[in-house]
């Protein structure tokens, strides 16, 4: 039995849903409405430390934290001795992928939050930083089809959920990502051709509306 | 060729030095004095994104971030098909270990910084939180000899460098960790019986003196 506890607009949770679809692992989806002040009993019991989602519950045991879950499902649903299916096959490639995943989680996400929360000069500074970070990721992509190389892989599924806020970034900051990061935007289009991504990524207008409500954006 | 770029008082770097000693991997140590305002050319070149240490350089390629490095050296210096030597052997055990490593890096470290930086009521709140987090880790340890079970392993080497600031915590906060977390303190003593830990952990007085200078503690 595999339960995946998540919220439809949670970018971290989207990664896991995409990964499970990519690996063909069936699961029961449990929605946790993060707009409610209180967490459910299930979340409080399964993730008492952070009371956050996503939580992936396998054989009654919770695995918490999206990168941790991706690692876990990659290990469990790869045959023994088989090359990893989500993460790169070699230690140096895995270290690089983990480095950039950490950059996305701790730099890009923090900058996105500051950008959406702030106004005036502070908002302008955060916008510049966010665009700079996206350009840096575009450099990492380079001329490859995907971050993982020819195939859609770990780092692609780590970053692609952020793209559901790209229209929101543009509206909030008054800029055009097609101009700033054209290669990255072509990568987004390629990813959206995949069934797993299309099935999971929410409507961009709905996403921005939710964030407007969350951060009190007028 | 393996170079390890680090600063003597960097708790994240200490993890890597302990792990390399545990695995018997020879390396050249390169000291980066973090008290200097400017980073060296080597650090700027090898970790342009964060300009931080530790950096482990193997065959000319940098691996950045202590948990990332532990993963890397565990993968590279374990024979193919062999059980991991630092991380637990099973995916669920690895997921647990990674969860708590993340807790230490993003909760305990942030609370330590707030505690050392603040004064008065704020310092008191941070102290209470820090003790609560250490008690939580003590619960994770339970009655085991080590966090990893019978053997000193990944989570032990992730946490043990923090113990070099425990005397500093006590002096700064006016409390006794032997009273608050007796089991955790016995675990510290057990870890210090290991050659790898003794060789790497710095003098506790020197550590607190450095932090006093850093955070302007009187």
Image (spheres, coloured by chain):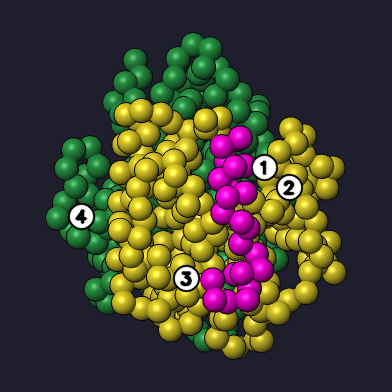
Chain colours: A green, B yellow
Say above or below: B179 vs A137. Answer: below
Contact flag, marks 3 and 2 (Cβ < 8 Å): no
Residue B148 in picture, x, y percent from top left = 44, 76
Q: Is residue A44 left or right of residue A197?
A: left
Residue stretch rendered in magenta on the structure: B192-214
The front one of A7 and B4 is: B4
Q: Chain of mark 3?
A: B
Residue in the picture at 49% in, 11% down: A120
* Residue receiving disc 2: B47
Q: Image quarter for residue B198?
A: bottom right
Quarter-of-image position of residue B25: bottom right
Quote the CA–CA distance across marks 1 and 4: 35 Å
User: What element does badge 1 sit on?
Assistant: loop
Q: Which of the numbered marks, if any, corresponds to residue B189?
A: 3
Q: Residue furthest left?
A: A41
Report the residue that reaches farthest toward the top. Answer: A120
How many marks on residues?
Answer: 4
């Amino acid at each position: 039995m595999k339960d995946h506890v998540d919220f439809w607009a949670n970018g971290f949770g989207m990664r896991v849903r995409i990964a499970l679809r990519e690996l063909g692992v069936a699961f029961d989806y449990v929605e946790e409405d993060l707009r409610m002040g209180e967490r459910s009993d299930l979340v409080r019991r399964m993730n008492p430390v952070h009371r956050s989602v996503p939580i992936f519950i396998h054989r009654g045991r919770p695995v918490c934290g999206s990168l941790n879950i991706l690692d876990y499902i990659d290990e469990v649903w790869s045959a023994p001795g088989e090359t990893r299916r989500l993460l790169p096959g070699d230690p140096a490639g895995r270290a690089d992928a983990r480095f950039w995943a950490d950059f996305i989680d701790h730099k890009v996400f923090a900058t996105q939050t500051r950008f959406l929360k702030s106004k005036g000069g502070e908002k302008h500074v955060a916008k510049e930083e966010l665009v700079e970070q996206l350009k840096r990721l575009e450099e990492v992509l380079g001329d490859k089809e995907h971050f993982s190389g020819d195939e859609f892989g770990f780092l692609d599924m780590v970053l692609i959920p952020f793209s559901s806020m790209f229209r929101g970034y543009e509206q909030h900051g008054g800029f055009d990502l097609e101009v700033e990061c054209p290669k990255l935007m072509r990568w987004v289009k390629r990813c959206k051709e995949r069934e797993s991504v299309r099935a999971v990524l929410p409507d961009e207008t709905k996403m921005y509306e939710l964030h407007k409500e969350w951060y009190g954006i007028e």
